[in-house]
Image (cartoon, rainbow, N blue to C red):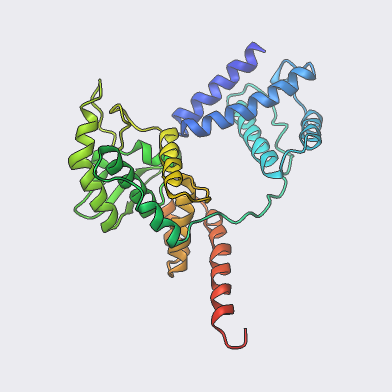
Amino acid sequence: MENVNKSLQLFKEYLQIEKNYSEYTIVHYEQSIEHFFLFLNQESISNLSDVTYSDVRLYLTELYKKQYARRTVAKKISTLRSFFNFLLREKLISQNPFSLVSLPKREQKLPHFLYEEELEKLFKVSDVSTSLGQRDQALLELLYATGIRVSECCKLTLQDLDFSVGTVFVHGKGNKQRYVPFGSYAEQALTNYIQKSRKELLKKASVHTNSLFLNFRGGPLTTRGVRLILNNMIKKTSSTIHISPHVLRHTFATHLLNEGADMRSVQELLGHENLSSTQVYTHVTKDHLRNIYLSSHPRA
């Protein structure tokens, strides 16, 4: 399986260098591909060029037997199709056995978002008299104010903020870049953090960094670190709600649409390549409108 593993390494380099995917995304790609490699090993297939459409169908059967969710199956197939397309481009194989496979229809799950009352509780939990509390407050305000992805947030440097016009320069997926505005609450929290606590945290660092958000050792904050911060915030509110950086992104989009923002603008702010990715939030806003109608219309 040496050539197989070498092909995976080449693909990972392609995702990292050419596609500029986050480390988090690349790990998920790698896990899906390695899962398929285990299947190939069971079937005594040692060369990727020997994989046929029949083998792919058998692999799909195995996934369904193990009761994988349709969403998981769709992600695995999409990843493997991309992997084999890369191998085809590099002329390591002569055909893509996944090209004829149709993806299973995904279950339509509405994105989870927070109501304003839930958000207010979160905004009050950080002890802003401490360095870490000021950092946490600035992080929360910026994530909600901009709807940026956690990976995008962790890439931000001090130079990416422009307080004169209230925008942040975001380095998005696939080398795509965009400017996203932020409001007065985020501006105040970021100013407090940068002028005071960031300088305190930076003193603990062994190497100087321009990263906007720092951990308690003064190094760049990671995506895992952001998730831990948000989880700790939730614990302080004694709330049962689930929160992640992506929930804040969902909340950002939902609140904008609920207040009348047009979908194209929200698409641009989120950095979605396709409008269909943004349209999922209309299901939430339609539900919101229906509730308003039912509670307000005399003959509802």
Residue drawn at point x = 63 percent, y = 54 percent? 109
- The spot of residue 94 in percent (x, y) is 69, 25
Q: Is residue 57 left or right of residue 86?
A: right
Q: Residue at x 33, y 46 (%)?
A: 126
Q: Residue at x 25, y 38 (%)?
A: 131
- The residue under the point 73% across, 44% down is 102
Q: Quadrant of the N terminus?
A: top right
The image shows residue 203, relative to residue 230, as above or below, that is above
Residue 153 can be seen, yes or no: yes
- In terms of depth relative to the viewer, which is nearer, 212 or 20? 212
Report which quarter residue 17 is drawn in.
Answer: top left
Residue 208 coordinates in the image, percent (x, y): 23, 25
In the figure, is residue 222 to the left or right of 298? left
**Figure label count:** 0
Position of 74 relative to 41 (above/below): below
* x, y percent for residue 124: 34, 53
Question: Front-most of 248 and 103?
Answer: 248
Spot the residue most to the bottom: 298
- Residue 175 seen anywhere in this rendered image of the structure: no
Q: Is residue 178 placed above or below 257 in the rendered structure?
A: above
Front residue (pair 69, 81):
69
Furthest residue toward top: 2
Is 59 or 148 nearer to us in this picture?
Answer: 148
- Quarter containing the C terminus: bottom right
Specify the quadrant of the image occupied by residue 132.
top left
Q: Give the image location of residue 192, x and y in percent.
A: 21, 46
